[in-house]
């Protein structure tokens, strides 16, 4: 990434995307400790914790009792809990 100032270009793209999404405003300093940033991080952390709390036992059940799990699990559970939350894109606007 150091070749050809790729890091600077990457940072600029991230800043441009954040500005386009309304996360950054022109003029002034951006504070990462502002309450809305901290609240968003806290909420995201809670969503990840809940999703992993559900995913982990379901995966364990899939190994121990796969027939029982197939009988009781809803079809959308596989899509929702089959992958780690970090590998998925969360809905925007606080919808779950």
Image (cartoon, grey):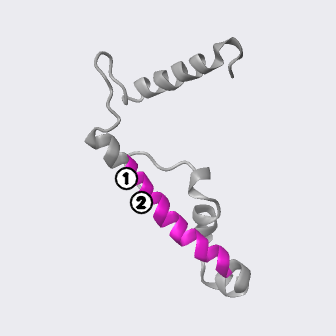
Q: CA separation, marks 1 and 2?
A: 6 Å
Whole-percent x, y for residue 57 in the image: 59, 77
Would residue 73 appear left or right of 40 to someone viewing this image?
right
Whole-percent x, y for residue 90 in the image: 50, 50
Would residue 86 appear left or right of 95 to someone viewing this image?
right
Q: Is residue 74 visible?
A: no
Relative depth, front residue between 85 and 1: 1
Residue 71: name its quadrant: bottom right
Kindly indicate whether the residue at mark 2 contacts the one at mark 1 (C-beta within 8 angstroms). Answer: yes
Mark seen at residue 42: 1
Q: To which residue does mark 2 refer?
A: 46
Can residue 14 be found in the magenta stretch?
no
| Residue pictured at 43% horizontal, 45% vertical | 92
Whole-percent x, y for residue 12 in the image: 52, 19
Mark 1 closeness class: few <14, some 14–19, many ≥20 residues within 10 Å: few
- Which element type, helix, strand or loop, lies under badge 1? helix
- Which region of the structure is painted magenta? 41-61
Residue 83: name its quadrant: bottom right
Quadrant the C terminus occupies:
bottom left
């Amino acid at each position: 990434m150091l070749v050809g100032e790729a890091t600077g270009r990457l940072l600029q793209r991230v800043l441009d995307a954040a500005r386009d999404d309304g996360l950054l405003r022109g003029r002034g300093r951006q504070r990462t400790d502002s309450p809305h940033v901290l609240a968003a991080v806290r909420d995201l952390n809670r969503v990840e914790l809940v999703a992993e709390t559900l995913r982990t036992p379901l995966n364990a059940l899939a190994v121990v009792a796969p027939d029982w799990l197939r009988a009781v699990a809803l079809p959308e559970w596989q899509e929702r809990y089959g992958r780690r939350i970090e590998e998925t894109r969360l809905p925007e606007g606080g919808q779950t």
